[in-house]
Amino acid sequence: MENKKVAFCTLGCKVNQYETNGMIQEFKKCGYEIVEFDEFADIYVVNTCTVTNMADRKSRQMIRKVKEINPNAILVAVGCYAQVAKEDLEKIPEIDLILGTNEKKNIVSHVEKILNEEKQTSIADVMHCEDYADFGDVTFTEKTRAVIKVQDGCDRFCSYCIIPFARGHIRSRRPESVISEITKIAEKGIKEVVITGIHLASYGRDFAKREKHSREYRLIDLLEDINRIDGIQRIRLRFVGANINYRRIC
């Protein structure tokens, strides 16, 4: 039987871009073929954004576009807009599967259930998620630089911002997982990495809450460890609305 085709549309930030790469890698491991979003596919995944009203509207537009390409396709809405507005998305009959921000790493198993079942929604309460949802080593990238997600969530709860409700409290990725991923990426010949997160400056603050450490491990410590990886020549930090570039320190 011919492999099923999967297409992705990614809206929003670099974190979403990284998570799309992770989902693509999971589908590829299971034998699915990845195609462009405007091509005919069996499964369409819209990785949504919700930082503004315009982002919400764009997410809905891309969701509705899918059935124009293939009316019989499985349509998956995943991500931040799905997390905070599942009731709105459940009213859109074209959607077969709604997944929150923490369900992305298990997307393949959810989709394969859809092949034999009716539409479903899987949204975890991110406000009670304490562990970072780790894809493992995500080495898939179509660019000459690789995006690396190291942190999720935000504890600021600014009055104008919905992100904490879409992403939950801060959760940092274990440094050994980050180093393992970047080491494998460097072995593929990629020389530049983009380190990103929802509130990147808070990296490591949650470690002390969950486990005992002999010393504090923060973002600067992670950058120093990344800088020691052979082959990495530039480290770029991607904050919300800003880029910072660092040449390799010899």
Image (cartoon, rainbow, N blue to C red):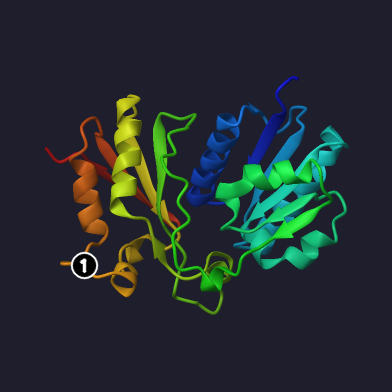
- Quadrant where the image shows the C terminus: top left
User: Which residue is more in the foreground, 182 or 162?
Assistant: 182
Residue 62 seen in the figure? no
Identify the residue shown where x is 74% and y is 36%.
43
Numbered circles on residues, count:
1
Tell whether 99 sits left or right of 211: right
User: Which residue is more in the foreground, 54 or 133?
Assistant: 133
In the picture of the structure, the residue carrying the numbered disc 1 is: 213
| Residues packed near mark 1 inside 10 Å, few (<14), some (14 to 19) or many (20 plus) | few
Q: Find residue 171 and report its horizontal and vertical position in percent.
A: 41, 64
Identify the residue shown where x is 44% and y is 63%.
131
Residue 146 seen in the figure? yes
Tell whether 159 sits left or right of 92: left
Tell whether 46 sits left or right of 138: right
Identify the residue shown where x is 73% and y is 39%.
44
Q: Would you place residue 111 above or below residue 132 in this image? A: above
Residue farthest toward the top in the current orientation of the protein: 1
Q: Find residue 1 and report its horizontal and vertical position in percent.
A: 75, 20
Q: Would you place residue 207 above or below residue 138 in this image? A: below
User: Which residue is more in the foreground, 32 or 113?
Assistant: 113
Residue farthest toward the bottom in the current orientation of the protein: 159
Tell whether 13 sits left or right of 81: left
Q: Find residue 141 and report its horizontal and vertical position in percent.
A: 47, 32
Identify the residue shown where x is 55% and y is 48%.
105
Q: Find residue 218 and report its horizontal and vertical position in percent.
A: 25, 62
Callout 1 amino acid: His
Quadrant location of residue 136?
A: top left
Q: Would you place residue 211 above or below residue 105 in this image? A: below
Q: Secondary structure at mark 1?
A: loop
Quadrant location of residue 204?
A: bottom left
